[in-house]
Each structure stands twice: as structure tokens, then as C-alpha cells.
Image (cartoon, rainbow, N blue to C red):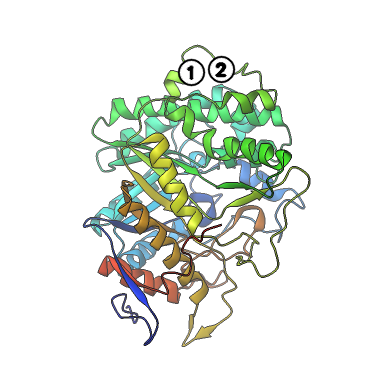
């Protein structure tokens, strides 16, 4: 279905450089359960914190919810066929805890677990590697009613839930990811209130962050016991931080923000503990940390999943505003590919995890141009291409990066933003549920097939001397 050739040269007269990836490099896409599944009231699924959050007036920008989303629950075979047609090696998805154990603990909902078993089997039948994530923010509401991630018992419940899923699917899944972006779960959910459950407490945020990490460690132990040959992974979002100026105030603010966003989770997983000076800076007493917790959290992982979208420029007073003309996506995030390359090299130098995988990278774009029934999203295509060039450079520098998963396969429910931002490389008509690959999907498919691409104007994002 590809009408774009990733091996074709750049336009005549334009300099280009060929970027070939190592043999076996993994190409794929990613989604999450609440963002695409729909069927929120079908087959025994119970409400999650996001169902509750969406029902609260003013929480979601367009007043929408995940009741239908992309209707993936009822269309998964069609969607797997689409992934197959694009030639992807792997598909990352998440499993909805309230669909598998509606009460958070205890009885298993067989219909819910059967859905994920059927999805995994369909992927394998089409030679697509399933990459499940056990938690992508949709906590059962019943557990939130008991304190959510502020309550230590939630971490214990998560380990039991993980064991249920791994017992069923462990013979077919080779890589298990525990959590997706625990920083967002703790910070956006319990500190800023912009995500479910919508709390605004720094103290709750710190408690949640520790219990999320504890959940990862406890679940990791269960995974090791039940599927000893499988790989253990966690996905962390990284946002490189830079101070707005060289003033002491801005430098200090950026330092602590960097610790919170980029080291708070990776450091403990690597056995380095929490950034102690930032804990003191925010007056977190670590009352939630019990003997043995940090050793549990530091269970060795086989794979670090890396989500990257943008960098952040921090100033001590007020929010930094990007200068006019700065490349941005439709959510106002700066487009700055070199930050990904710097991030990858820095992560490898600091932690030396066995392997890394780009588990999310992509951009919401206007998607206004259409030709022959297809969206001509050259801006998204260029975003992906420029970031792939940074991944390629990091591999050349010795970083053990095994693949790249674009976010997202589909236009979907984008959390507090609703259905406005379009991240998908595949367009979704939410009235008809018709899927239509965009130009970026066809380019990415051709690139995956060729295991490389030609980069026009390779000096565009080249570092410059101060």
C-alpha cells in the first residue's frame, strides 16, 4: 500500500544522507487502552478513574470521554490487519486493569482477560510482536476510592493484578512493561490536577510516586517468578530541562525540575535512590519509604522504554514563553529533535541499562491538507524523520537502542485535551470509525520495510557552537 519509497533520493540539488539502521531494528507503533478501546461498559468492565474524571464538568477540554474512542475493543482484528499491512514488527498496547479485575482486587473478569488473550493471539498470528503495558493510567475507580496511589495497598494490588495477566499470557509475551510514565500518573494526577483523579497536593504526589515505583518492583518480582525467560521493562517519559537564563534562580529551578522529571524514577530503578537534595528542597520526609522498598524498586530491568516529545525551558518565576517562530505542534510543545539525541546519550552514560526502546515519539499536527482522500501530513512526517535521525546518531554513539515505536497508531482520545489533538499516523473518523493511513504512515511503513531512509538537509538540526 506504500506509494512512498524510503530509499528514493532527496529532491535534486538537496543534500541528503542515508540513515540505515542495524539488522533486527524494531519498527512499530503504540496505543493505550483508555485512549482507543471504548466499550467502557461492556463485558464486565468497571469504571476507571478516567471514566469518573471525564464525567466531571470542565475536566476534558471538549467535554468528551472514552466511551467509544476508536472502538478498538470491537475492531481489534481489523486493527491488527492494518498494523500488518503497514509492515510493523511490533505493537505496543496497554491492558486495562478495570477490565481484567473490575474490583481492583479479587475476582477476575474472564471476558476482559479473554479480550487481551485474543488480541495477543491475533498479533502473533500476523507475525507482530505484542508489547503489553500493564498500567497506562486507568486505575480502577474502586481503588481510587480507597486512596489510589497515595495508598500503599494499591501497589500490592497491582502486583496481584500483574500476576493474573502474566499467568494467562506469559507463554506468549516475551517482554512485560509494568508502568507507563509514572511521573505523569503522580504529578498530573495528584499535584497539578490536570489528569485523573484530579488532586492538587504535592504531598500526595510524592506518596504516589513512591507507591508507583514500589508497584513496579513488586510486579517485577512476580513477573520474574511466573515468566523467568521474559524481559522486564518500564516506560518513563523524559523531558530534557534547560534554564531560561544563567541566573542562579533559573539554574536552581531547572536543576530540581530535571530531577523530578528525568531522574526521580530512573535513579531508583537503577539503584541510585531518590535525588535526595530535591527531596529536601520540596520537604518530602519520605515517610512512605519502608525498609526494603528501595531494594524492591531496584529490581534489575532488561529494557528501558523511553517516551520523548519535547524539551522544557524553565524559569524561576512564571512560565517560559517560546519565542515567536519557534517550531511547535498543535499543543504548543516545542519541536526540538536534538534534545532526543542528547537525552539518549545521557541516559546510556548515566545508567547503562541493557537495552533501550523508543516506546513513544510523535506529534499532534493540524492535518488540514488532504489529497486523494488521504491527509498529507508532511509536518508530522518530518517530525518523525528528524527524530529518527537523532536515534540513528545515538546508535552510532553506542547507545543500545533496539527499536522505535511511533505515537500513535491512531488519532484517539488525548486525555484532558479530548479528541482535538491528532497524534495518529492513521486518521480515525470518530463518527464512522473508518481508518485511513496518512502520508506519514505510508512513509514510516516504507522506512520500516527498507530499515532506513534518506535525510534531506542533514545540517538542519546540527549542533552549533555558542
Instruction: Give the CA separation, mark 1 to mark 2.
Output: 6 Å
State the image quarter where residue 271 is shown: top left
State the image quarter where residue 174 is shown: top left
Q: Residue at x 60, y 36 (%)?
A: 260
The residue most toward the left is: 23
Q: Which mark is residue 293?
A: 1
- Residue 232 in the image: above or below residue 428: above
User: Does residue 257 appear in the picture of this structure?
Assistant: yes
Q: Residue at x 60, y 65 (%)?
A: 329
Describe the element under mark 1 as helix, strand or loop.
helix
Residue 463 position within the rendered picture, expressed as x and y whole percent measured from the top left: 48, 60
Q: Nearer the viewer, residue 446 or 460?
A: 460
Q: Nearer the viewer, residue 119 or 74?
A: 119
Whether residues under marks 1 and 2 lie with C-beta atoms below 8 angstroms apart, the answer is yes
Residue 342 position within the rendered picture, expressed as x and y whole percent measured from the top left: 46, 50
Q: Which residue is mark 2?
A: 289
Asked whether, in this view, residue 347 is left or right of residue 128, the answer is right
Amino acid at each position: 500500500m506504500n506509494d512512498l519509497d524510503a530509499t528514493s533520493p532527496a529532491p535534486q540539488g538537496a543534500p541528503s544522507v542515508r540513515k540505515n539502521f542495524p539488522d533486527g531494528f524494531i519498527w512499530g507503533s503504540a496505543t493505550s487502552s483508555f485512549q482507543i478501546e471504548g466499550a467502557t461498559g461492556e463485558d464486565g468492565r468497571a469504571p476507571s478513574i478516567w471514566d469518573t474524571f471525564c464525567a466531571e464538568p470542565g475536566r476534558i477540554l471538549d467535554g468528551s470521554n472514552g466511551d467509544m474512542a476508536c472502538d478498538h475493543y470491537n475492531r481489534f482484528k481489523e486493527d491488527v490487519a492494518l498494523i500488518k499491512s503497514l509492515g510493523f514488527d511490533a505493537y505496543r498496547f496497554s491492558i486495562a486493569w478495570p477490565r481484567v479485575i473490575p474490583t481492583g482486587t479479587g475476582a477476575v473478569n474472564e471476558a476482559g482477560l479473554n479480550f487481551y488473550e485474543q488480541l495477543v493471539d491475533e498479533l502473533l498470528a500476523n507475525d507482530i510482536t505484542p508489547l503489553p503495558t500493564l498500567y497506562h493510567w486507568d486505575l480502577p475507580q474502586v481503588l481510587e476510592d480507597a486512596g489510589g496511589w497515595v495508598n500503599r495497598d494499591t501497589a500490592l494490588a497491582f502486583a496481584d493484578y500483574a500476576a493474573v495477566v502474566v499467568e494467562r499470557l506469559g507463554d506468549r509475551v516475551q517482554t512485560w512493561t509494568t508502568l507507563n510514565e509514572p511521573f505523569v500518573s503522580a504529578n498530573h494526577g495528584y499535584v497539578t490536577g490536570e489528569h485523573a483523579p484530579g488532586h492538587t497536593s504535592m504531598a500526595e504526589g510524592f506518596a504516589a510516586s513512591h507507591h508507583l515505583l514500589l508497584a513496579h518492583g513488586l510486579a517485577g518480582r512476580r513477573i520474574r517468578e511466573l515468566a523467568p525467560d521474559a524481559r522486564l521493562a518500564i516506560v518513563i517519559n523524559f523531558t530534557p530541562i534547560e534554564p531560561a537564563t544563567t541566573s542562579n534562580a533559573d539554574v536552581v529551578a531547572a536543576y530540581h525540575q530535571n530531577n523530578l522529571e528525568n531522574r526521580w524514577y530512573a535513579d531508583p530503578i537503577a539503584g541510585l535512590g531518590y535525588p535526595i537534595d530535591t527531596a529536601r528542597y520540596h520537604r518530602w520526609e519520605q515517610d512512605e519509604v519502608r525498609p526494603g522498598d528501595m531494594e524492591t524498586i531496584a529490581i534489575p530491568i532488561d529494557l528501558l522504554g523511553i517516551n520523548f516529545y519535547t524539551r522544557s525551558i524553565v524559569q524561576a518565576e512564571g512560565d517560559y514563553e517560546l519565542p515567536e517562530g519557534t517550531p511547535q505542534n498543535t499543543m504548543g510543545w516545542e519541536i526540538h529533535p536534538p534534545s532526543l539525541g542528547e537525552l539518549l546519550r545521557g541516559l546510556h552514560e548515566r545508567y547503562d541499562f541493557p537495552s533501550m526502546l523508543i516506546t513513544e515519539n510523535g506529534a499532534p499536527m493540524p492535518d488540514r491538507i488532504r489529497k486523494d482522500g488521504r491527509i498529507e501530513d508532511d509536518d508530522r512526517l518530518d517530525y518523525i524523520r528528524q527524530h529518527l535521525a537523532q536515534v540513528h546518531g545515538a546508535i552510532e554513539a553506542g547507545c543500545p537502542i533496539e527499536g522505535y515505536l511511533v505515537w500513535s497508531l491512531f488519532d484517539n482520545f488525548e486525555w484532558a485535551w479530548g479528541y482535538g489533538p491528532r497524534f495518529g499516523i492513521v486518521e480515525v473518523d470518530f463518527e464512522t470509525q473508518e481508518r485511513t493511513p496518512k502520508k506519514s504512515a505510508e512513509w514510516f511503513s516504507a522506512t520500516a520495510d527498507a530499515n532506513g531512509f534518506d535525510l534531506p538537509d542533514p545540517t538542519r538540526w546540527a549542533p552549533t557552537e555558542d
